[in-house]
Image (cartoon, grey):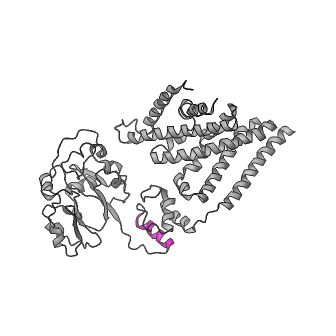
């Protein structure tokens, strides 16, 4: 697969939120406002890309050589959790502005299953390091896209006259489901 | 045997490696944190409501400790929290100025004329997009109650087509101020009783035409105020609450009663909040 095809595939066709249903928690949790959605989007892009590269190196150099593939999940979680902590520490020192902008979203990424999902799928697909990086960036951009789309919708829905029983999360889930259906329209693009 | 030792070594080793790396990182990237921030944070309510304008209590505590925000920055905490914070910061909070929100419009169904009948969704923000709202006065309260919906402290009622705020219940959380599309809700000191309840910057003749209680720009208040608390700009009288001594001369003299004595409440107001 060409790099461009991987990119388009992860952003639109196999969007991690709408097609693979990963990262649903932050997708619903921080999408009330455009501002927080953007902050989360940036934070996830950053961490997913870094985590994918590091987990790929660990998988190839340690797990595969020792035949310990069954430790994949726990090792990857270890890597992601430490990475998030490290990024938080470093960001606090190097760029306090960016740190306060991302705020509470940084530690939340530890529990974002999309980060783990991307890392594991990279290995399953048999990507090279370059393909892994492109796939990770594409995946996070796809997540970013899904997040700002639903945030924009929710800002509109806030002032719409929605039946009481559906107001809040129910209508958000319905909207998310419809968007997921809409994204199946991209199937066959790549 | 290697089947058992390998995973233990790999996982233990990686865990140790990351642990060491993180502890080194925390030394390298150490950021000096003012101990006062922590203390102030503990004194704050911890509701993370965001009413102070900072992202959560931690943001507010940092701003207070750095002197960027007053010790009274936490609006919902009130006097008690302000005193605790002031103790930590070593300043006096005795003169805590409590602010409350006030709707600067008295143009209810009888006093103000409509230019059309609005039958859309009951939300001021939507009504405001239709030719600026149903009132002829483009500055007045739209009466759909967006502020009422957003108030979490039971301080707002819609009475006869306009919003009124009970200052006893108001915690100055600023939510109504932010949501009002007409920007007619403002913060005023709790003790101030004379308030110019009109925001119309139209010329007096126009105002007279559409509202019986609007500021027509006669400047009687400006001339009669003993402390020169009034200023006049854009056809509208404004009061400087720092100079006002609550003598209420302006309230008596104002020909259209646009300046209101907020200490006197209507019967309907009392009934609404009693229930």
Please provide percent x and percent y for residue A120: 67, 36
Residue under the image location 62 percent in, 39 percent down: A136
In the displayed orientation, state which residue is furthest to the right.
B1
Q: Is residue B224 left or right of residue B36?
A: left
Q: Note whether B32 is above or below A172 in the view shown.
A: below
Start-end of magenta stretch = B66-91
Please provide percent x and percent y for residue A42: 54, 46
**Would residue B118 be visible to someone looking at this image?**
yes
Q: Note whether B117 is above or below B269 in the view shown.
A: above
Question: Closest to the observer: A69 or A94?
Answer: A94
Residue under the image location 29 percent in, 56 percent down: B185
In the rendered image, which quarter is residue B270 located in? Answer: bottom left
Magenta stretch contains residue B81: yes
Please provide percent x and percent y for residue B250: 18, 68
In the displayed orientation, state which residue is furthest to the top.
A188
Question: Closest to the observer: B121 or A136?
Answer: A136
User: The N terminus of chain B appears in which quarter of the rendering?
Assistant: top right
**Would residue B194 be visible to someone looking at this image?**
no
Question: Closest to the observer: A91 or B10?
Answer: A91
In the rendered image, which quarter is residue B53 located in? Answer: bottom left
Q: Note whether B104 is above or below A141 in the view shown.
A: below
In the rendered image, which quarter is residue A151 located in? Answer: top left
Q: Is residue B26 left or right of residue B67?
A: right
Q: Note whether A142 is above or below B124 in the view shown.
A: above
Please provide percent x and percent y for residue B61: 50, 63
Q: Is residue A65 left or right of residue A17?
A: right
Magenta stretch contains residue B134: no
> What is the number of callouts on the image?
0
Q: Is residue B224 left or right of residue A131?
A: left
Residue under the image location 17 percent in, 46 percent down: B114
């Amino acid at each position: 697969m060409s790099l461009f095809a991987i990119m388009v595939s992860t952003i639109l066709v196999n969007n991690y939120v709408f097609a693979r249903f990963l990262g649903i928690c932050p997708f619903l949790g921080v999408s009330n406002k455009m501002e927080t959605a953007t902050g989360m989007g940036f934070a996830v892009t950053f961490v997913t890309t870094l985590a994918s590269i590091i987990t790929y190196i660990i998988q190839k150099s340690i797990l595969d050589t020792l035949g310990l593939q069954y430790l994949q999940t726990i090792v990857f979680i270890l890597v992601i959790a430490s990475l998030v902590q490290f990024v938080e520490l470093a960001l606090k020192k190097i760029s306090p502005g960016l740190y306060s902008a991302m705020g509470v979203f940084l530690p939340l990424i530890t529990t974002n299953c999309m980060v783990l999902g991307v890392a594991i799928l990279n290995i399953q697909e048999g990507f090279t390091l370059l393909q892994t990086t492109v796939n990770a960036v594409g995946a996070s951009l796809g997540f970013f896209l899904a997040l700002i789309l639903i945030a924009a919708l929710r800002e509109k829905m806030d002032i719409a006259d929605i039946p009481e029983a559906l107001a809040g999360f129910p209508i958000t889930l319905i909207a998310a489901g419809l968007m997921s259906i809409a994204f199946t329209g991209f199937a066959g693009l790549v | 045997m290697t089947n058992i030792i390998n995973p233990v070594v790999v996982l233990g080793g990686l865990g140790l490696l990351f642990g060491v790396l993180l502890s080194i990182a925390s030394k390298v990237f150490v950021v000096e944190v003012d101990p006062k921030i922590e203390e102030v944070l503990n004194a704050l309510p911890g509701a993370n409501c965001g009413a102070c304008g900072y992202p959560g209590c931690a943001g507010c505590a940092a701003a207070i400790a750095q002197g960027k925000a007053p010790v009274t920055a936490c609006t919902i905490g009130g006097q008690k929290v302000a005193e605790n914070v002031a103790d930590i910061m070593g300043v006096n909070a005795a003169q805590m100025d409590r602010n409350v929100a006030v709707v600067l419009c008295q143009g209810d169904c009888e006093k103000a004329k409509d230019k059309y009948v609005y039958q859309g969704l009951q939300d001021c923000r939507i009504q405001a997009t239709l030719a600026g709202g149903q009132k002829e006065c483009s500055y007045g309260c739209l009466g759909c109650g967006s502020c009422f919906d957003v108030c979490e402290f039971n301080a707002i009622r819609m009475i006869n087509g306009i919003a009124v705020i009970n200052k006893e219940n108001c915690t100055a959380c600023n939510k109504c101020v932010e949501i009002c599309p007409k920007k007619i809700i403002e913060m005023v000191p709790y003790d101030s009783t004379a308030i110019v309840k009109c925001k119309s910057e139209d010329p007096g003749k126009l105002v007279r035409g559409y509202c019986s209680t609007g500021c027509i720009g006669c400047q009687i208040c400006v001339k009669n105020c003993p402390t020169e608390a009034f200023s006049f700009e854009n056809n509208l009288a404004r009061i400087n609450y720092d100079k006002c001594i609550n003598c209420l001369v302006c309230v008596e003299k104002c020909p259209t009663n646009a300046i209101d004595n907020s200490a006197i409440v209507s019967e309907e107001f009392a009934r609404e909040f009693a229930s």
